[in-house]
Image (cartoon, grey):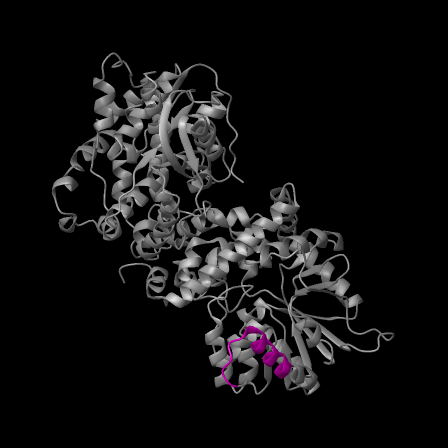
Amino acid sequence: MLNTERKPITGKRVQLMATCLCDAFYDDVAAATVQVLEYLGVEVVFPEGQTCCGQPAFNGGDWTASRKVVRHTVKTFAGEEPVVVPSGSCAAMMFHGTVLEFENEADLGEVEALGRRTWELGDFLVNGLGVKTWPGRFEATVAFHRSCHSRGTNSSSAASTLLGSVAGLKIVEFGEGEQCCGFGGTFSVSFPNISASMGALKLDHIRAVKPDVLVSGDMSCMMHLGGLAKEEGKPIKTRHLAQVLRDALKNGKLI
Amino acid sequence: MRFQQIDQFAAELKADTRAAVYDGSKKGHEKRTKLLFDEYADPDRLRRIAGEVKQHVVENLDTYLPQVEAKLKANGVIVHWAATAEAANQAVLGIMRARGATKMVKAKTMVSEETELAHFLEKHGMEALETDLGEFIVQIDGDHPSHIVKPIIHKNRREIATSFEENGLGAYNDDPQTITRRARHFLRHKYLEADVGLTGANFVSAESGRLVLVTNEGNSRFCLAATKCHIAMVGIEKIVPRDYDLALFLNLLARSGTAQELTVYTEYISGPKSPTQPDGPEEMHVIFVDNGRTEVLASDCRDILRCIRCGACLNVCPVYRQASGHAYRSVYPGPVGAVLSPLMMGDKFPQKADLPKASSLCGACHEVCPVNIPIPDLLLRLRNRAKEENVPSPGTPPMGAWALLASQPTAWRASLFGGKIINYLPTKLLPIPALRAWEAKRSLPAWRGGEFRKWLKTRKGRANVSPPAPSRAEAKKAD
């Protein structure tokens, strides 16, 4: 079982781990994360030296390369503040994956300590800050994709709590929700056929319930599903949880 | 080869086969979930307890194996130890020859699949007939099982009807009841003719020496009804400490494997026929098979030895559903097979080092495992082992350059800027195989490297988000 135990939140300052995907492709997701946190009066600090959580090499089996990056991340996110990351996948890497690959390393303790204060965004809002309802308005039918790294964590239920409370927003369930979208990091490029078939199946289920927008807490799943849909010539609208929450605030003229 | 073997296999799989595997596994998974969650308030708790019991056994095999041997002997059972598949098969052959036996009826046992017992015995002039319907069909087809619990999940009834016709079991008829009746008619005679009945064991109680067998067809009972000699081939990890533990394990096994509250037949076998019993085998042998298990025990993946062979992880696995069991080139396919099969190769690990890569690491297997095996963690450990042993892995991007960039902030920021090239150049021209593999199936979003950092610094009224001291120092050092 994943160890999702966290230090309780004290103070109103967090460090933002923007993720390499947002750094490279999805700047608006990172910006929305900042805006959502600041709306709640949280001071967001962005450690500029940050790069990546180390997961690509960890999943690829190159733990030596991964540990090099994790050690950099541990130094970059020094301090005591909670680290908030708009990705269940990067969060799980920090509190679970790193522990596995540092099992026999002398600096396991430091790595574990960072994991114990790293939160996926939705989990942080609901279980860290105690936010149970979200203000503003978002007129849309939303399909929420439960990304796989939220298994065994509180992230999916947190996202559902928040989305479900937004005025105008209607969540629709779709078939085989527990199944993976097929991204899987390096799996997506070393098993492109299986990866794409898994994605096509997920898209079929999603399209069947005709949502206005597909929402997830992980841009990696969205990048894969959105990219597949576009390649098929039938694009779908994808948004990150943070973008929906930020847009709800904007629509309600709260920011 | 450009991509992984399993991916290639999946791409070339017949649509019929994929549909059969997909439908069969999906149905199995959905029924299991409903049954477990309808009946138990907290099935996860049961899985955790069962996992702890089996882990305890795995870590104390050195105590339990002598204990179970003593119990079995006291019960009148002859105990054999086989370090390898070959030794296990030789032990069976030796027992048959000593009795002048030539015919065996076999119940379904995965360990005999490992040792390819039926082929071995046939080569030595013995008849070894599979009596589980699925295994029987696989045998007459010269095929291999593709699932631990449902050996013919990859076949549809039309294919089965055709092979029955080809094997002289009646004219073509794809009605499942007719197929079953014909198999039953053929097998009934064989049970009566056989000298030896071979079974596996789903569990062996260390406390009582009882072997526990579960089936739905009752074929293992028939295997032991008319034969005078019972041989059980058992993996050394099959032990549970007490008879009491069976309540937990039998409930979980049936629900996880076949979505039943209990299998139709559950047999408890304490030894050969006692003088007061009218019939049954008068001689009973248990062959404990290692075949690589002690090596697994010595590894950091020993948790996999908890496995009770229910197949729930196969049913839920999206990769298994797309690729089918045969893609794994192993007796054990799916997530459990992707861990167990390479480990059981011993020194030949590299030959199956690609199996642990065949996973998106979605974790569904861990979520359904009745003994709570952290399969994704074990897959990851094996990926790392393959890397450390320098096993080539087609399609896996090399990580050295990335690790260098991602541990030097200045270089990272430069590459965020430099990445913009993908917005202007056709990716065909870029010498990055991973990028091309991505684009073969999916569009790539526009590169917006560094835009977030720019926004953070230039937005109105909030330009004061500053890097914390340690990371600034780090950045400077790297500069």
Residue found farthest to the top: B461
Q: Establish if B127 lies above or below A50.
A: below
Image quarter (top left, top right, bottom left or bottom right) of the C terminus of chain A: top left
Residue B102 in magenta?
Answer: no
Residue A209 figure quarter: top left
Q: Which of A169 and B62 is in front in this view?
A: A169
Residue A63 visible (yes or no): no
Residue B172 in magenta?
Answer: yes
Q: What residue sits 35% from the left and 24% below the top?
A: A248
Image quarter (top left, top right, bottom left or bottom right) of the N terminus of chain A: top right
Q: Which of B319 and B100 is in front in this view?
A: B319
Rendering coords of residue A242 (x, y %): 35, 28
Rendering coords of residue B97 (x, y %): 65, 85
Q: Establish if B274 lies above or below A236.
A: below
Main secondary structure along the magenta-highlighted residues: helix
Residue B311 visible (yes or no): yes
Q: How many numbered marks are there? A: 0
Rendering coords of residue B105 (x, y %): 64, 79
Rendering coords of residue B237 (x, y %): 62, 59
Q: What residue sits 46% from the left and 54% below the top?
A: B317
Q: Establish if A119 lies above or below B463.
A: below
Which residues are the magenta region? B171-187
